[in-house]
Image (cartoon, rainbow, N blue to C red):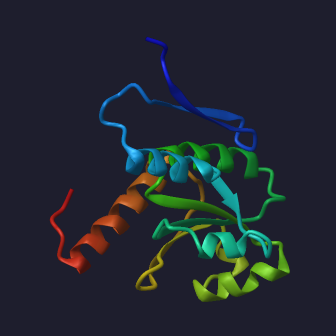
Amino acid sequence: MPRVVCQLILPVDNDRRDLDMNNREVDAKKLVRFVRINELRLVTEYDPVTAIGVMQSSVEFNLLLLTDKMSPKHPERMRKFRAAAELYKGKILFILLDSNLKSNERVLSYFQLKKSQLPALAVFHTPDDEHDVLTVDEISIERVQDFCNRFLQKIRQIRGEAPQ
């Protein structure tokens, strides 16, 4: 029997994702979830064009990296941020916010941050506007993971859910 695969090629992230359709557990719901999770970039850059898509995303958690894209440390920060994003695909929408764009000043003020406090991570739960901010000198996969896990745990406690 020939192998049937649903394949998504993501030119933006230079990546390819496969879902083995021969698995009996794959149903319409799982196929839709696969497409939804993989249609998003690992990291979406926030700007006036992408803002609407970010706000309308079905993912309830957003993690923003608020940083200066002109910084010499930016490429390394992004490499680590992308690696962390891979761990939370479909659970948290990872967003890059360039602090140099005038249009992003409102977001900085929402999180009560000044440019002198950057880089920073800000996590946001869209249904209830619950959020948390962490100013950091260096971005690491472990630091991002710890920050995300603590926030997810906090939201579970607020909802009265059992810890995972």
User: On the rendered structure, is 62 left or right of 109?
Assistant: left
Q: Residue at x 47, y 54 (%)?
A: 90
User: Relative to the observer, which residue lies in front, 41 or 87?
Assistant: 41
User: Relative to the observer, which residue lies in front, 110 or 60?
Assistant: 60
Name the image quarter holding the C terminus. Answer: bottom left
User: On the rendered structure, is 106 left or right of 135?
Assistant: right
Q: Is 149 drawn above or below residue 60 in the view shown?
A: above
Q: Is 154 drawn above or below residue 148 in the view shown?
A: below
In this view, the residue farthest toward the top is 1
- Count every numbered label the image shows and give the total: 0
Q: Residue 29: x, y in percent?
A: 39, 51
Q: Is 112 drawn above or below residue 68 in the view shown?
A: below
Q: Residue at x 69, y 76 (%)?
A: 52
Name the image quarter holding the N terminus. Answer: top left
User: Relative to the observer, which residue lies in front, 16 or 144?
Assistant: 16
User: On the rendered structure, is 151 left or right of 93?
Assistant: left
Q: Residue at x 80, y 57 (%)?
A: 71
Q: Residue 87: x, y in percent?
A: 45, 45
Q: Residue 42: x, y in percent?
A: 61, 49
Q: Is 140 drawn above or below residue 136 in the view shown?
A: above
Q: Residue 77: x, y in percent?
A: 66, 50
